[in-house]
Amino acid sequence: MAKRSSLSIRIVEGKNLPAKDITGSSDPYCIVKVDSEPIIRTATVWKTLCPFWGEEYQVHLPPTFHAVAFYVMDEDALSRDDVIGKVCLTRDTLASLPKVKAAPHSQVLRKVPEVVQAEGRGYAGDQPGPLSHSHTGFTGWAHLTEVDPDEEVQGEIHLRLEVLPGPPACRLHCTVLEARDLAPKDRNGASDPFVRVRYNGRAQETSVVKKSCYPRWNETFEFELEEGATDLLCVEAWDWDLVSRNDFLGKVVVNVQRVRAAQQEEGWFRLQPDQSKSQRAEGNLGSLQLEVRLRDETVLSSGCYQPLVQLLCQEVKLGTQGPGQLIPVIEETTSTECRQEVATNLLKLFLGQGLAKEFLDLLFQLELGRTSEANTLFRSNSLASKSMESFLKVAGMRYLHGVLGPIIDRVFEEKKYVELDPSKVEVKDVGCSGLHRQQSEAEVLEQSAQTLRAHLGALLSALCRSVRACPAVVRATFRQLFKRVRERFPDTQHENVPFIAVTSFLCLRFFSPAIMSPKLFHLRERHADARTSRTLLLLAKAVQNVGNMDTPVSRAKEAWMEPLQPTVRQGVAQLKDFITKLVDIGEKEELDLQRSLSLQAPLVKEGPLFIHRTKGKGPLASSSFKKLHFSLTTEALSFAKTPGAKKSILIKLANIRAAEKVEEKSFGSSHVMQVIYTDDVGLLQTAYLQCKCVNELNQWLSALRKVIINNAGLLASYHPGVFRGDKWSCCHQKDRTDQGCDKTRSRVTLQEWNDPLDHDLEAQLIYRHLQSVEATLREKHRELSGGTEVGTVPTNPGEAPKDPLAALLGVLQDLRLLHSSSLPSSPSSEPHCALDLQT
């Protein structure tokens, strides 16, 4: 059994931000920190005081995290970025707020309307009704508050406290051992920390440790415990400064009576801000619209979920001929708000069981069975539509990148002004060498049409060449879809319906959204500016017209798209030919393709990084980093000079012991990670890899941590610095093999579309959803069985249950008992964490 926590974060938009630039505007972006560690950076929205981001992230982290903070920054090209303000939500706050429903995934692609400010009280706007899948958390507008340096504390301090008996009076011994992850307050990326211990009007201080955020003191202070004296011991960490005033690093307040009762306490204490200062007024810093959902899961061992998994798999294998058809019942009892999440969980579960194609085929048949009009097929947000969307993102994202990537890059690089709607045309000055003339509206429209025809033609050509690049499981699933639709609508008048069924997913729900919002599909690091965004929107509309097979209805909507009609008509013919070839995959070819892929180590992540391995003594300059192309598979981390060059293995995956960040002062950059591994003789070695931004750094760390999660000998601690000269730059220890001075963060990861499947977690999420609608399932069973009470239905091994719904209810009851029985006696799966002794 393991406890897991995750944060679903949606950064929607900001409003009424203050102007930070001389132009009277700002260039805002957001930094998300979990316990003071930067995890996410949104794209910058240029020249606006009301930015819209619409970015979604999911972070997996230990249940012991304390807070998540959102910093709104103003990007500056020539100086340090300005801090506009922040919103901070503690874990306790998120856990105590009312349950909120997840916003439909499609809302990410459009601007969300303003709602009344939530003031930290949970869901704002329409209050959710009974939800089948909800989380605690915050949704709404929150005021930005000023960033007070005294509140920007981080890290922990290691203390040993003991009470020794008299005479004449008892004595309190406070040993300040060490600290870790202190906030860097100096320009060199470190601090000069010392500790002040105060009790009953007396104060004593440790020595100052220069240039370290991981100091070690091992100094003991003694205080007499007088009768009637204060019961609080205050331990404060400070950054010493020669000229200016000392900077506050945080404090811990300990209840002495608690220590007296226990005689001795030792552990890591989390540093807290100085709450004695009066809170500053919020001021006029603007607001941020957020959705932050906290989910805690207790995941049981694999064997506990086998009855549930087997029951669902039996239903899928039997298809529409099954006796109980649990899948239709699950769809019927799933609310619209959580259908996307349930669909994704089911899809991943069946992917792990090798039944994704069969699961989707069953959903296709169910939807076709209740659809009478061909033009409404797969147009609703049904379980089939949502599951197919999730399937394409999980199984087809690399394929989408291969087809769309070069076209999207070209649109961003050209930055041409493109407009087809005469009511929106802006005439421009053109010319050279000082000779300018104004373009006519007709010239702008013609030039725009030429540009769009070129982009659309290039996209369709790339798509037509991509049949062999499309994953076999995707092709086989589209084959089943094409076949089922043709069987349901065999008439000549419905000749295009099977093609439109395929394009409704491939073009309308996959390619077009990716064209409109390439940042959200990881095709670009930044959002498009207004000009590029308009070009992408018009291109997406053209792709939709091709996907709709150029129907009269689609043409009539926006008559000004007429200049693209020749390319659209040609594209329809190209697309039909492409789909015909795409679905022409036999069972043998499918198996052969899957077998050939299974022999290759699947690619997890790739991209350019700068590498440096420390050798000998002397300073480590950033120029010593060499740019190479890295590839991470489930077997090794490899590199090559160029993407197409022969790869060389840098580190075998089984040898990796940790993947962690490196503190900024070590290399003068905050985007360096270290991969700690054992060499051929079993000695620990470290490879230092530099990334270009905080997002790339966290994506690489996440990918590495996920693929080594089952490695033997993972480290519990590491050095965030480097061994330079004769000592570690972080804690100044002179033994190179010294135990690390900071704890590893192997459980902090970002969810990505190409994550390894987590079978137990998916089964737990499905169980939790079914448990939330159990009352509805029981009512449905009584309705179907004529009032018969639910009981466990025994079956022979491998035989489908005679009453699957009754069997499902029995399985849910068993899992509920397993959860309740495991909670009191289960040992904590968490590493040793900070003691909560402060008041």
Image (cartoon, rainbow, N blue to C red):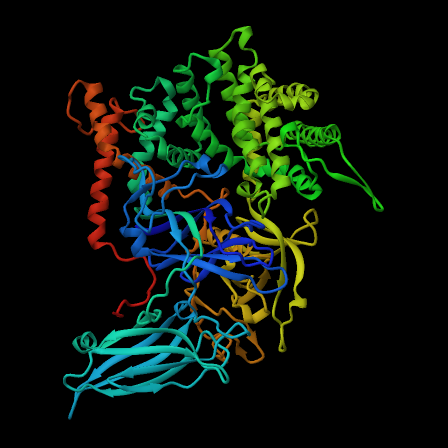
- The relative height of residue 825 versus residue 478 in the rendered view (above or below) is below
Give the quarter of the image for residue 580.
top right
Q: Between residues 229 and 721, which one lies in front from this camera angle? A: 229
Q: Give coordinates of residue 108: x percent, y percent.
A: 47, 39
Is residue 211 among what the camera can see? Answer: yes
Outermost top residue: 492
- The relative height of residue 509 versus residue 164 in the rendered view (above or below) is above
Give the quarter of the image for residue 103.
top left
Q: Give coordinates of residue 768: x percent, y percent.
A: 29, 39
Q: Between residues 397 and 102, which one lies in front from this camera angle? A: 102
Please state if 220 lies on the left or on the right of 464 as rendered: left
Q: Give coordinates of residue 94: x percent, y percent.
A: 32, 52
Is residue 467 among what the camera can see? Answer: no
Q: Between residues 510 and 616, which one lies in front from this camera angle? A: 510
Residue in the picture at 60% in, 65% down: 79
Quarter holding the C terminus is bottom left
Please state if 305 lies on the left or on the right of 146 as rendered: left
Residue in the picture at 49% in, 68% down: 720
Please state if 336 lies on the left or on the right of 703 as rendered: left
Outermost bottom residue: 168
Picture mark count: 0
Q: Give coordinates of residue 23: x percent, y percent.
A: 60, 55
Please state if 13 lies on the left or on the right of 466 as rendered: left
Give the quarter of the image for residue 309.
top left
Q: Between residues 671 and 264, which one lies in front from this camera angle? A: 671
Residue in the picture at 36% in, 35% down: 338
Residue in the picture at 75% in, 31% down: 440
